Amino acid sequence: MTIELRRRLLALATVMFLLSACSINPLKGGSESKASNPSGNSSSKGSAFSPSSDASKDVREAIAKLNTAYPYRLTETVSASGNSQTAMPDGTRVVEFAAADRVHMKSTSKIGVDVEAITIGDKHYWYSGGKWTEGSLDLASNGGADFAKKVAEMLKDVKYVGPETVNGIECHLYSCTIDGSMGGQNWTGTAKIWIGAADGLPHQSDSDFKVANSFGGKSHIVYEYGGNIKVEPPVM
């Protein structure tokens, strides 16, 4: 497996449930007016949430609220599952969102495929080989909104499970299946999302997926809201 494929697997593992909204749309670029408020003070947090009769709608709206939840941080752990030890690299990814178009992502893996990137407005920076380089972001340039829509279509059979406390926060748990084609491969699996009762925001998501019935992985994402998160251009 090539380094490029491993990097894409790490990204797609993240996307499999929530990150179509929180790491694709924000990274597709935006106006510098948004970037002028790196502290995220103008962002609106969620409000009290109760499950409705439409589980799919509840999940869609929770994901959409991430677009105004700045600043926040997500930490994702990706691990191989089943007989995928040599195909799916274990790794950790931390993404900090100061605003819609002020994002810092750092990903590390046990096989040494590390990625770091900063997005500010329409400027994208990659760290590689001990230095920063300004360039384009592949997923964004390929149409972040279209990519996010495709991922959303892969989430099927969304169901409300019930109230559950996760990471000390009262939440409502939802489950769904993953079924669809992406990148020329068929993706299947299951996923869960915990939506906060006090704010209607995602607080945790777990997914277990398989690609082309040959290899798969598990993704565990934890969300933290607020805090002093700042994203500045790197020193070139």
Image: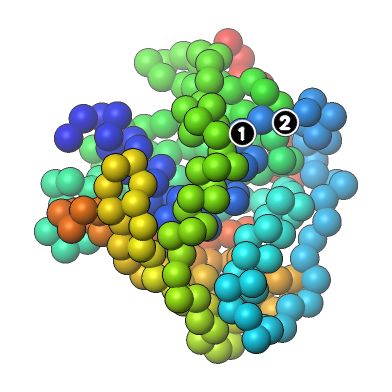
Residue 27 placement: quadrant: top right
Three-letter amino acid code of the residue under disc 1:
Lys
Among all residues in the image, which is located at the extreme right?
Answer: 42
Residue at the image point whose x is 49% and y is 22% from the top: 126
Looking at the picture, tell me which residue is in the foreground, 7 or 156.
156
Q: Is residue 86 left or right of residue 112?
A: left
For residue 76, say whether it is visible: no
Question: Where does the C terminus fall, quadrant-wise?
Answer: top right
Question: Where does the N terminus fall, quadrant-wise?
Answer: top left
- Please state the horizontal and vertical placement of residue 113, each as a whole percent of the image: 31, 33
Residue at the image point whose x is 42% and y is 39% from the top: 107
| Contact flag, marks 1 and 2 (Cβ < 8 Å) | yes
- The residue pinned by badge 2 equals 30
- Please state the horizontal and vertical placement of residue 143, each as a whole percent of the image: 55, 34
Residue density around tag 2, few if under 14, some if 14–19, many if 20 or more, within 10 Å: some
* Mark 2, secondary structure of its residue: loop
Residue 16 placement: quadrant: bottom left
Q: CA distance from mark 1 to mark 2?
A: 7 Å
Residue at the image point whose x is 21% and y is 30% from the top: 2
* Mark 1, secondary structure of its residue: helix
Q: Is residue 113 left or right of residue 27?
A: left
Residue at the image point whose x is 61% and y is 33% from the top: 28
Q: Does residue 177 sit above or below 111 in this rendering?
A: below
Q: Does residue 57 sit above or below 100 in this rendering?
A: below
Three-letter amino acid code of the residue under disc 2:
Gly
Circle number at residue 84: none
For residue 186, say whether it is visible: yes
Looking at the picture, tell me which residue is in the foreground, 57 or 82.
57
- The residue pinned by badge 1 equals 28
- Please state the horizontal and vertical placement of residue 153, each as a whole percent of the image: 49, 59
- Please state the horizontal and vertical placement of residue 206, each as a whole percent of the image: 43, 66
Residue 69 placement: quadrant: bottom right
